[in-house]
Amino acid sequence: MLKIGVAGKGGTGKTTLSSLIILSLLRENEKPVLAIDADPNSNLAENLGIPQTKSLVEIIDEIEKVKNNLPYGIEKSKYLEIKIQEAIREENGFDLLVMGKTEGPGCYCYANNLLREWMEKIEKNYKFVVMDNEAGMEHISRRTSGNLDILFIVSLCDKISLRTAESISRMIGTLKLNIKKTYLVVNEFRGENIKSETKISLPVAFTIPFDNEIYKLLEEGKGILNLSKDSPAFKSVRKFFNCYLQTGKT
Ligand SMILES: Nc1ncnc2c1ncn2[C@@H]1O[C@H](COP(=O)(O)OP(=O)(O)OP(=O)(O)O)[C@@H](O)[C@H]1O
Ligand SMILES: [Mg+2]
């Protein structure tokens, strides 16, 4: 299993990149993929163009309500397993798991621990795990094992966005995460000279051009899974993964 995470400043294109990675893997027949929406304001389903699912946190809330009142004859651990399984939405070649909001009035330590244990177990069933994150990264260590094979930090071309990407990378370095490779991905790229914009220490994996087809699809309420093979954004991401899958190197 190869686990890929996507991080970056708000609105830079994290969810779009996550969808493009999922699409590239599916089109290369690199299945099954587990797509994890770890942003509390979940919109990966919408971005991909599939129906929204019940989140894991919503399901854990439901379990909490009935945990001392389980149907007769069902063991608690079995019941948890069955209910939690409901959080997985099966699509063609991939599954989607939406984590949901944990900032409600209750204590979510229980939920977070349960999530972490369960996720570590199910992730092993997939060839790739692609995780879309919220703008901060702190929750990654709270909610998951924190292991990633590749982390993409997305940035636009402007100085502020690039500097934020660098500081996210530094901040990640201070967390207890085990990340094998961290890359910068420059989104909505129009041929600017990135290195002259600001000091960048992160290696650039690839750039993604602004793509009208993405804009149109999302305007029409369709998702990135419907993107054509000629889409320039899709081509950029596919090229990187083709190379990665062929050589095992990036
Ligand atoms: N390369 C691109 N070409 C065209 N539109 C794009 C591109 N990248 C992102 N967008 C659009 O920009 C908007 C923001 O992108 P996205 O939702 O992926 O950002 P995000 O980093 O996930 O945001 P948030 O921090 O709110 O989660 C979306 O409407 C998306 O469709
Ligand atoms: Mg997003």
Image (spheres, rainbow, N blue to C red):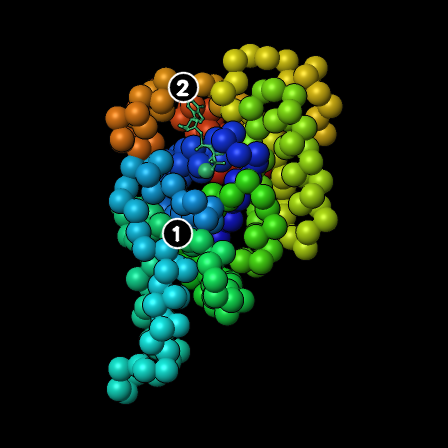
Q: Decide: is 160 above or below 36.
A: above
Q: How many labels does the image show?
A: 2
Amino acid on which disc 1 is placed: Val
Q: Decide: is 66 above or below 163.
A: below
Location of the C terminus by quadrant is top right
Ligand 1 closer than 8 Å to label 2 CB: yes
Which residue, as the protein is rendered here, is positioned at the far front? 105
Q: Residues within 10 Å of mark 1 (few under 14, many from 20)?
A: many
Q: Residue 233 location in percent, x, y?
A: 43, 23
Name the front one of labels 2 and 1: 1
Q: Decide: is 150 above or below 17.
A: below
Residue 176, numbered circle = none
Classify mark 2: helix, strand or loop.
Answer: loop
Q: Residue 176 location in percent, x, y?
A: 68, 55
Residue 183: quarter of image: top right
Q: What residue is pinned by disc 1?
A: 98
Mark positioned earlier in the residue sequence (2 or 1) = 1
Is residue 34 at least partly visible in the picture?
no
Identified at 61% across, 20% down, the residue is: 158
Q: What residue is pinned by disc 2?
A: 211
Q: How crowded is mark 2: few (under 14 residues within 10 Å), some or many (20 or more)?
A: some
